[in-house]
Amino acid sequence: MSHARLVPLVAAIAACAACGATDPAPAPVGTGEVTEAVVRRVVDGDTLIARVDGEDERVRMLGVDAPESVAEDRRVECFGPQASARAKQLLPEGARVDLATDPSQGSRDRFGRLLAEVSLAGEPVTVNERLIAEGYAEVFRGDGRGRLQPRLRAAERTARGARLGLWSACRSGGR
């Protein structure tokens, strides 16, 4: 089977496998505040700029740790450019998205970025989960209490097992 056909199949399997996790409700239902926004641009595989209430807001995708591709003080990591490119495909400029906070995680990180689950309007699976399920990022566990953690961990296990993306391209499986 070609890689182009395998990726959506594995992503769907990961999403279904995660359905049996602790929280089966599709994101962003049941989270903290949900805000509608418009994508201005993707910065890298786990960060974007979104227009929220007329202001540009830097958004970090909750639970997602994509390889570095643009940090001035760090080298480009294995699969970083590919992760960034995939995030740009999933979140094109002008796309309408829902940004959902998770009360257990706080609303901002130490850099002042809004922490959010990012869903394309009307989509039941977050972009956060899709990036991990397709092998473009791994789970950022933080304190491990995030609402999406069970689903993200299941998606990562499936991607790792199928050796998708960074799990096959980078030394020792990951970055």
Image: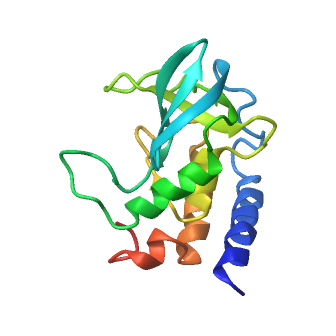
Tell me, what colour scheme is on the image? rainbow
Could you say where residue 119 lies in the image, as x and y percent from the top left?
68, 38
Residue 151 seen in the current view:
no
Q: Residue at x 68, y 75 (%)?
A: 4
Could you say where residue 36 lies in the image, as x and y percent from the top left?
69, 22
The quarter of the picture where residue 155 lies is bottom right
Residue 132 seen in the current view:
yes
Q: Residue furthest right?
A: 122
Q: Is residue 169 above or below residue 135?
A: below
Q: Residue at x 31, y 26 (%)?
A: 110
44 or 13, nearer to the observer: 44
Q: Residue at x 58, y 25 (%)?
A: 101
Q: Residue furthest left?
A: 73
Q: Residue furthest bottom?
A: 1
The quarter of the picture where residue 116 lies is top right
Q: Is residue 159 above or below residue 22?
A: below
Could you say where residue 132 lies in the image, as x and y percent from the top left?
56, 57
Q: Is residue 144 above or below residue 34?
A: below
Quarter of the figure that contains the C terminus: bottom left
113 or 107, nearer to the observer: 113
Q: Is residue 130 above or below residue 1?
A: above
Q: Residue at x 48, y 47 (%)?
A: 64
87 or 167, nearer to the observer: 87
Could you say where residue 54 lies in the image, as x and y percent from the top left?
58, 12
138 relative position to 170: left or right: right
Quarter of the figure that contains the N terminus: bottom right
How many marks do you count on the picture? Answer: 0
The quarter of the picture where residue 23 lies is top right
